[in-house]
Image: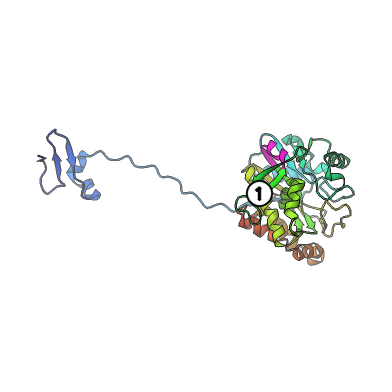
Amino acid sequence: MQEKVNAPSRPLCFRNKSGTLLIMFFLAAALVSQGCAAQVPKEKPQESKPVVAATATPEVFMTTDISGAGLMKVYDKVKTPISGKVAIKLHMGERGNTNYIPPALVKELALMTKGAFVDSNVMYGGARSTTAGHLEVAKEHGFTFAPVDILDADGEIKLPVKGGLQLQEALLGSHIMNYDSIVVVSHFKGHALAGFGGAFKNVAVGIASPNGKRAIHSGGFQSGTAFLERVADYFKAVADSHPGKIVYINVLNNLSVDCDCDGNAAHPSMPDIGILASTDPVALEKASLDLIYSRPKEESRHLVERIETKNGKHQIEAAEKLKLGSSKYKLVKI
């Protein structure tokens, strides 16, 4: 039997035979206002949790000071922590090419980060197709103040391409996994197959082993949509392997229509623009293109023609589809 102890006009409260108070909850609001509720300890109010904000518009930092000091200015503005053993992914130029990033531009960065310049061997022959030859070219071009690591000197590794547009795996120079962080310094220019070469191609094709490079180009995919999507797939494999530990820098000078891998590259066809840096590679590449397209047509027409005839913009579309970043950005000039 249960003994009623309160008047019917109030919420019903009962005691069982052992004397324990039982409360029948009818309405939460009623219990707060009636006397019986006073016998119930109030719950401690929960702390309000911050609402997770939508991803902020990525920032791309820019300077027109194309020097070692200018490069460090934009690098310092990027908030991603670069720590541990650092790889500086850089194309150190084909023998005979003069458009590649000069060593002086990256010397302070290399010394400050204690980083190593890294690249993989090429598949098309020439000095840079062997580790010994590649190291010799790097030395000839003045990259002597920091270690140079040819990533596939000891073979390749296979990494997954999650949700790849064309490929499900990537073959990369095995040494890339020896590094905790990567600073990608890319000379932005035209390219005979990709339309333009910037961060995407520098990472994807540059870190791919020779077998990986063949996979990107295989099946007749020397250019076009499928080729550009394979570039994006390889880029994703590298980005996923070092999440949150990559900074991207584009140097927009010596703006030739040809790649630094061309020993007889065309002379630059438009004036220098500056140096850009971001943690978002899609934003960085889009900002670089926008700056080129914003120049007078008589300056940019040769490079724009190269980009458009090879559908180069699809690199950005493919990378954004793979959720590698955003083509919407805020340009911050410093």
In the image, residue 96 sits, relative to residue 289, either above or below, namely above
Q: Return the x and y of residue 143 as percentages of the image width and height.
A: 83, 39
Q: In the image, what residue occupies the spot 88% across and 52% down?
A: 263
Residue occupied by mark 1: 169
Q: In the image, what residue occupies the spot 73% across and 45% down?
A: 207
Q: Is residue 250 visible?
A: no
Q: Return the x and y of residue 184 as percentages of the image width and height.
A: 72, 45
Tell me which amino acid carries mark 1.
Glu
In the image, residue 317 sits, relative to residue 76, either above or below, namely below
Q: Is residue 31 visible?
A: yes
In the image, residue 88 sits, relative to residue 256, either above or below, namely above
278 in the magenta segment: no
Q: Return the x and y of residue 251 as percentages of the image width and height.
A: 76, 50
In the image, residue 27 sits, relative to residue 148, either above or below, namely below
Q: Is residue 38 left or right of residue 138?
A: left
Q: Return the x and y of residue 320 as percentages of the image width and height.
A: 63, 56
Label 1 sits on a secondary structure element that is strand
Q: Residue furthest front?
A: 219
Image quadrant where residue 257 sits: bottom right
Q: How is the image coloured?
A: rainbow
Quadrant in which the N terminus appears? top left
For mark 1, does the 10 Å Cα neighbourhood hold few (<14), some (14 to 19), or many (20 or more) residues? some
Q: Nearer the viewer, residue 243 or 284?
A: 243
Q: Nearer the viewer, residue 137 or 19?
A: 137
Q: How many marks?
A: 1
Q: Nearer the viewer, residue 244 or 107?
A: 244
Q: Is residue 306 left or right of residue 330?
A: right
Q: Nearer the viewer, residue 79 or 148?
A: 148
181 in the magenta segment: yes
Q: Which residues are magenta?
A: 173-182
